[in-house]
Image (cartoon, rainbow, N blue to C red):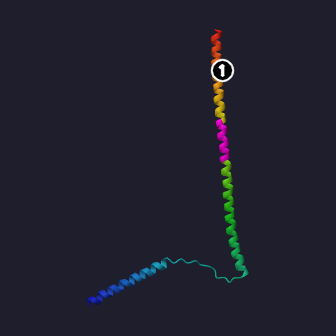
Amino acid sequence: MTLLTNLYKYIFKLIQLSTSHLSQRAKNIKNHPMINEAVDLKALIRQYEVELKKLRSELEEKSRLIHTNEIVIQLEEEKKRAEEDKQAAIYAFEQASKQYLQEREEKKRLEVRKN
């Protein structure tokens, strides 16, 4: 009797595990529904239209990316020119400042000589 009870429990657990594995596998099944169409002209045209839409959207996106890249390159060039202009302005300011200081020193020397 004990042997039958243990055997029954063992068989029951095997059935549970088997059912569990089956349900897990069924859960992982992915369905991809498609319309059953006979290969005819209308179906081919529909298929090509869908493909054309997809390709046009990809082309449009790539065109936007190219345009965006061109803008980025243009902005980087403008930034580089602005930096060069800034450096030139700083250099010109330093030169003007040096000249101003030299003229001021010269004016002081002349005033000292005059007096």
Query: Where residue 75 appears, x then y in whole percent?
Result: 66, 48
Q: Secondary structure at mark 1?
A: helix
Instruction: Give the extent of the magenta segment.
Output: 76-87
State which quarter of the image contains the N terminus.
Answer: bottom left
Residue 2: which quarter of the image? Answer: bottom left
What's the residue at 65%, 30% (across, down)? 93
Residue, far top: 115
Query: Where residue 103 appears, x then y in whole percent?
Result: 66, 20
| 78 in the magenta segment | yes
Query: How many numbered tags mark residues here?
Result: 1
Residue, far left: 2
Q: Does residue 11 lie above or below 56 as drawn?
A: below
Instruction: Tell me the kind of residue under disc 1.
Output: Glu
What's the residue at 73%, 80% (across, down)? 41
Left or right: where does residue 59 sit relative to residue 19? right
Residue holding disc 1: 103
For the residue pair 84 and 11, the one nearer the viewer reads as 84
What's the residue at 64%, 21% (across, down)? 102
Query: Where residue 67 appears, x then y in whole percent?
Result: 69, 55
| 115 in the magenta segment | no
Query: Where residue 59 appears, x then y in whole percent?
Result: 69, 64
Classified by dominant secondary structure, the portion drawn in magenta counts as: helix
